[in-house]
Image (tube, rainbow, N blue to C red):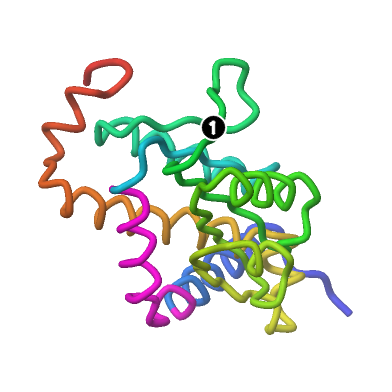
Amino acid sequence: MKQAKPAGTASASAGYLLDRLGKLLAEDRSREIAEATDIVVSAKKLFVYGVGRSGVAARAFAIRMVQLGLECFFIGETITPVVGEGDAVLIVSNTGSTMSANQVANIARRVGAKVISVTGHRTSKLSHASNVVLLIETDTDPERPRLAPLGTLFEEAALILLDGVVAEVMARLGQTEADMRGRHAIMV
């Protein structure tokens, strides 16, 4: 069997990702997004958490929340305050079984915070510990391991889905891109 040329595989992967992301993100999550947005905009403080590349998607969301003027922190940073009653915690975890993600969710619920999860597994411990679940199921395609290994498809879908939540929060708060630019770390 002849192996594909690397550039051909890269192109196939990019095409696969664009196709699958389009299908995944076309699923109707409007109710869950509205519920998540309600929680985010009404929270005293917003905390986000994720490990590895899921953490990268979570951090990107946190940056946008700060640029929208919300008090937002990434759990695990040395300057992050304590989660308390009236706060919200958004956790990104494909498996929903990452031990630290579940610990964060359980502690948040115990102290009276609301939990939003972005996960790939409806029946995971994280889903059960969450007030709102933004579900992104990616493990159903046999081509995925070859063209989008490990959590690639989930992580990219999570980033895009959360960018949609950013737009929803932005609209709800009546913010503009100019408002956000004024809070950008390098004042662009």
Q: Is residue 180 above or below residue 100?
A: above
Q: The magenta stretch spans which residues?
A: 23-41
Q: Is residue 29 left or right of residue 81?
A: left
Q: Is residue 144 above or below residue 55?
A: below
Q: How many marks?
A: 1
Viewer-nearest residue: 127 or 12: 127
Q: Split into 4 quadrants, where in the image is the N terminus?
A: bottom right
Q: Is residue 168 above or below residue 25?
A: above
Q: Is residue 10 magenta?
A: no
Name the residue that disc number 1 marks. Answer: 74
Q: Split into 4 quadrants, where in the image is the C terminus?
A: top left
Q: Residue at x 36, y 44 (%)?
A: 43
Q: Residue at x 51, y 64 (%)?
A: 131
Q: Residue at x 11, y 33 (%)?
A: 178
Residue type at mark 1? Phe
Q: Residue at x 21, y 48 (%)?
A: 170
The main secondary structure of the magenta stretch is helix
Q: Is residue 34 magenta?
A: yes
Task: Residue 44 in the image: state x and y as whole percent.
Answer: 36, 37
Instruction: Identify the secondary structure beneath mark 1.
Output: strand
Task: Residue 94 in the image: state x and y as whole percent.
Answer: 67, 61
Q: Report which quarter residue 183 is drawn in.
A: top left
Q: Is residue 186 left or right of residue 74?
A: left
Task: Residue 62 in the image: state x and y as whole percent.
Answer: 43, 37
Task: Residue 124 in the image: state x and y as whole percent.
Answer: 72, 70
Neighbour tally class for label 1: few under 14, some 14-19, many 20 plus, Cα within 10 Å: many
Residue extending farthest to the right is 1
